[in-house]
Structures are given as C-alpha cells and as structure tokens.
Image (spheres, grey):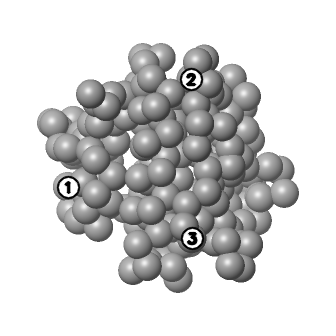
C-alpha cells in the first residue's frame, strides 16, 4: 500500500484476507445490503434506510474519492470476491485530518475483518501525511476495540444530534 505525495491513497489495498477498493456505481445494492441492514448499522452514524438513500451516499463517496483522493472504500473478501463491508475515511474541515469509518455486515462479525481493514486503512492514511480521527458511541465496545487495535487512542468527547460520541485519534507515525 502506497500513498502519493499529494496524499492520495493508492488502491486497492490488499491485506491477508481482504481487499479495500474504490466504490463504483455497480456497488449500489451491496452498499444498501450493508448500510440498510439495521442490525449491522445499529451503532453506525451513516446507516441508509433505503436503496435510494444508499445510492446517494455511494455517489457522495465517489465524489470524495475524486476530490479528496480518499473516501469510504468497499471491503471485499479475497476468497469469495464479495462486498462484506465498508472502511475508509470521510474528509474533515482540516485537510490534514481524515475521519475513519468502518462497518462490516453483521453476517461477518467476529472474524477480525473490521480490525484488519481499519488497520490497513489507518496505515495508508498516516503514510499519506494525515492524522486519523474517529468518533464512536460510548456503548459501542466492539468499534472501540477495533479503533484501539488500529492504533487510535481515546482523546475526548463531543455531542452530536444523536448524543454523546467519544473521539479517537491516531497521530502521524513518529
């Protein structure tokens, strides 16, 4: 996995079991299968209740990829070559900071895939010269474990329209 001087992440990013890749218009139904599945997105701020909403979300991510050089990416399982989750980044107001997001479909929980994908994404983003932050609901222990294993540490709290969030941060590698 490589990052260019401009901070663009080279895709795909391959791990032992997964491939992180740019999303395409062909991913609409797969994205909806993940973000429209209530058990999967119960603790995720970017769930999408309809195929139309998921398609709009997907198109915004494709624009992010083109304009920022990164976005949320599709996570495919190597063996089956199927979309099993989403992992990547949302741009922030600070061009030196990207916000990490990750979600694996509930059918694939407990396999370590969220940790594997998030760790690879965080490595690539910090190598590109950006800090990584994440916001996680205080009761989402599984997501907090993933953030910790990906090298982030809890640094504070904030409140959004849905309530309290913990703030996690990964500084650039020393």
Whether residue 137 is visible to the viewer of this picture, yes or no, is no
Percent from the top left, x then y, of residue 111?
A: 43, 79
Is disc 2 surrounded by few (<14), some (14 to 19) or many (20+) residues within 10 Å? many
Percent from the top left, x then y, of residue 95?
A: 47, 17
159 with respect to 41 (left or right): left
Label 2 – label 1 distance at C-alpha: 31 Å
- Residue with the mark numbered 2: 7
**Residue at 58%, 18% in the rendered image:** 5
Cβ atoms under marks 2 and 1 closer than 8 Å? no
The label shown at residue 138 is 1
Numbered disc 3: secondary structure: loop
- Residue with the mark numbered 3: 17
Observer-nearest of 125 and 62: 125
139 with respect to 53 (left or right): left
Q: Is residue 111 above or below residue 55?
A: below
**Residue at 43%, 42% in the rendered image:** 123
Percent from the top left, x then y, of residue 54?
A: 68, 54
Label 1 – label 3 distance at C-alpha: 29 Å
Observer-nearest of 163 and 66: 66
Numbered disc 1: secondary structure: loop
**Residue at 73%, 61% in the rendered image:** 51
Observer-nearest of 63 and 77: 77
Whether residue 153 is visible to the viewer of this picture, yes or no, is yes
**Residue at 50%, 27% in the rendered image:** 128
Numbered disc 2: secondary structure: loop
User: Where does the N terminus fall, quadrant-wise?
Assistant: top right
Cβ atoms under marks 3 and 2 closer than 8 Å? no
Is disc 1 surrounded by few (<14), some (14 to 19) or many (20+) residues within 10 Å? some
The label shown at residue 98 is none
**Which of pointers 1 and 3 lies earlier in the amino acid sequence?**
3
Percent from the top left, x then y, of residue 77?
A: 64, 72
**Which of pointers 2 and 1 lies earlier in the amino acid sequence?**
2
């Amino acid at each position: 996995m490589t990052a260019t001087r401009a901070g663009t992440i080279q895709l795909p990013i391959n791990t032992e079991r997964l491939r992180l890749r740019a999303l395409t218009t062909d991913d609409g139904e797969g994205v909806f299968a993940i973000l429209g599945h209530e058990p999967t997105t119960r603790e995720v701020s970017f769930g999408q209740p309809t195929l139309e909403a998921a398609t709009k979300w997907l198109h915004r991510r494709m624009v992010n990829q083109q304009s920022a050089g990164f976005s949320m990416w599709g996570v495919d399982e190597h063996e089956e070559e199927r979309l099993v989750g989403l992992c990547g980044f949302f741009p922030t107001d600070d061009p030196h900071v990207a916000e990490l997001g990750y979600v694996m479909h509930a059918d694939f929980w407990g396999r370590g895939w969220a940790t594997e994908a998030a760790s690879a994404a965080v490595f690539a983003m910090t190598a590109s010269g950006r800090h990584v932050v994440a916001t996680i609901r205080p009761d989402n222990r599984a997501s907090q474990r993933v953030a910790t294993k990906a090298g982030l540490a809890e640094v504070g709290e904030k409140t959004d329209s849905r309530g309290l969030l913990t703030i996690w941060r990964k500084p650039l590698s020393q």
